[in-house]
Image (tube, coloured by chain):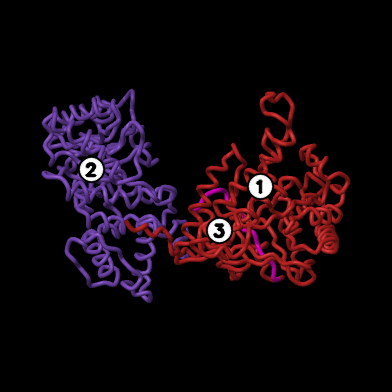
Chain colours: A red, B purple
Amino acid sequence: MAVPEVKEKYAGRIQEVTLGAGSRGKTVAIGGESTLPFLHFEGTVANRPAIAIEVSDREPDDWSPLLKEAWGDVMGDPAKWAAKAEELGADVIALSLDSAHPERGNTGADDARKTVRKVLEATTLPLIVYGPGQKDKDNEVLVAAAEEAKGERIAIGNAEEKNYRTIVAAALANDQVVIAKSPMDVNLAKQLNVLIGDMGIPKDRIIMDPTTGALGYGVEYSYSVMERVRLAALGGDATLQQPMVLTVGYEAWRTKEARTNDEVPQEWGDWAQRAILWEANTAITLVNTGANLLVLRHPQSVALVRKAIDRLMAGA
Amino acid sequence: MLIIGENIHIISPHIKEAIANRDTAAIQKLALEQAAAGAGILDLNIGPQKKEGVEVMRWMTEAVQEVTDLPISFDTTNLEAIRAGLRLAKVQGMVNSASAEPQRLADVPPVAAEFGARLIALTMGAAGIPVTAEERVAIAIETLIPRAVELGIPMENLYLDPLFMTVSGCQEYCPPAIEAVRYIKLGMDPAPMTTGGLSNVSNRVPAEGRSLLNRVYMAMMMAVGLDSAIADPLDKELMKVIRIVETRDDSSAAGSLLLLLHDRVAAMEELEAGDVDMNEPDQVEIWKTYQVLMNKVIYTDNYLRA
């Protein structure tokens, strides 16, 4: 009996997006695959999933002590932090301009420029720059960041349905990449890509963030959403072919399991090991449904995820 | 196509208020408008009405029958209210609705049998709404039809509703509903009747986008033999599409593509990009709508622009 042919031939292909240009010593390309994750026998997996390490422009007061232990003194200085993250194996630096939040420092455009400049000088890696997640301040500091990093092809975000015009315009005007974030819903993800595309930004400058939850906090739901996005994209839906970025570190480190060891059952085991595995496990789950770029927090989970990706890419 | 006019529905604030005030004129106006627009049955959805159901249904039935002879579909979970309406009905009524959920399966069909009424039966069991056509049809064959037979309800009075779901969030349910209707109409002898809540397919869709989805789905459903739909007869564009399909009017760009779509679905074939004149905006709209209804392109509120 003949062995049935199981290879799928897809009509669509994931858009390749390159981060980094100009003074960046390295550039990172993500996306470009013509098949589902790691099905090397079936199509091309053009680029391996990349890892960004999250760096904040202010010492985070809500991060786990485990993260503070891991990073030590550099947490107070985004330039030193970025340099150390590069040393520990990041492909990309995800700089969060959190100090611009009205309740966390309310810094402005000038501070954002200085921080971005400092971090660009401290690392050769490409940058993602995130705003503080508050509409007016996002617009203020992301425009400043996009201008300051002109020629460096950074990614700025998040552009969301309620607030995307200014951010997309800044990316457009300064040749940057934009991150389109939607709330774990395939219809809304598509809608935002259409709206952003209407502004005329080329497809090789859009990354989508379909939002995830950590292991035990909705990762399986986001897995399904991403799977559906990816199948539609490979099926030929051009509005969903953007590579996907997920803020895994943010999600994993706010779970009770990772954040704290107070009053948890003894069976939960060693806290640090548990927390690191929580982040790594969430990340590895998501690369298997199409995540192209992971934003992580702990150096040891970065190492674990990198090792897993090495093995998944071994057949390429 | 038998249209069961959906407009007298408790979800409409206007109707809710009319019920609260026992505003006979408001109900009669809407009954007359739907009748004039081509409704074949008028659905009276009064909500659960646990306390006042009998009185409300009596009042509304009398109000409607004063101005039109159209049959009435009694749409409530209050069985006593349905009975009260059926007692007053001057022509054969309709019971909306039974399902394969054990309690509703036990309680609702006997009421239809008792009055010789038509019965809408949803292909939904205790486990909820199945995705696949096969599962929906299985509920009909294994549960709903035997129950009707047991009670002596003839197949021409049994209206199976395979459940139309919204393209906005339940997109994967849209194509199987079409196949379920096809199976019921082609695969059974004698075949029961079929119906469905057409406007459900565009639930949660912005108002300006709803009619297009409803009417393209209608053309596809007509292709597989749908007998009736709970729908809005005041939607002129929808009624026009029904007329186009029934009279095979290919005189417009939209009409010719709708007929082609209808014929393709009937033949279990697909509409293809090459069938569409991409310079005709009406055809492009139908093509894009067909693709989302077939779950080939992911729906989004601005899918026409994608």
In the picture as drawn, the residue positioned furthest to the bottom comes out as: B279
Magenta stretch in the rendered image: A175-186
Residue B66 visible in the current orientation: no
Q: Are marks 1 and 3 in contact (CB under 8 Å)?
A: no
The mark closer to the camera, 2 or 3, is: 3
Q: Residue at x 16, y 28 (%)?
A: B87
The mark closer to the camera, 1 or 3, is: 1
> Within the magenta stretch, is there residue B237?
no
Residue on which disc 2 sits: B42
Secondary structure at badge 2 equals: strand
Q: CA distance from mark 1 to mark 2?
A: 53 Å
Mark linked to residue A248: 1
Left or right: where B154 falls relative to A56: left
Left or right: where B286 falls relative to A153: left
> Within the magenta stretch, is there residue A181?
yes
Nearest to the observer: residue A51 or residue B93? A51
Whichever of labels 1 and 3 marks the residue nearer the N terminus, that label is 3
Nearest to the observer: residue B11 or residue A27? A27
Does A157 appear above or below A29? above
Amino acid carrying label 2: it is Leu
Indicate the quadrant where residue A312 lies.
Answer: bottom right
Q: CA distance from mark 1 to mark 3?
A: 21 Å
Amino acid carrying label 1: it is Val
Q: Residue at x 53, y 63 (%)?
A: A241
Left or right: where A292 falls relative to B195: right
Amino acid carrying label 3: it is Leu
Residue on which disc 3 sits: A192
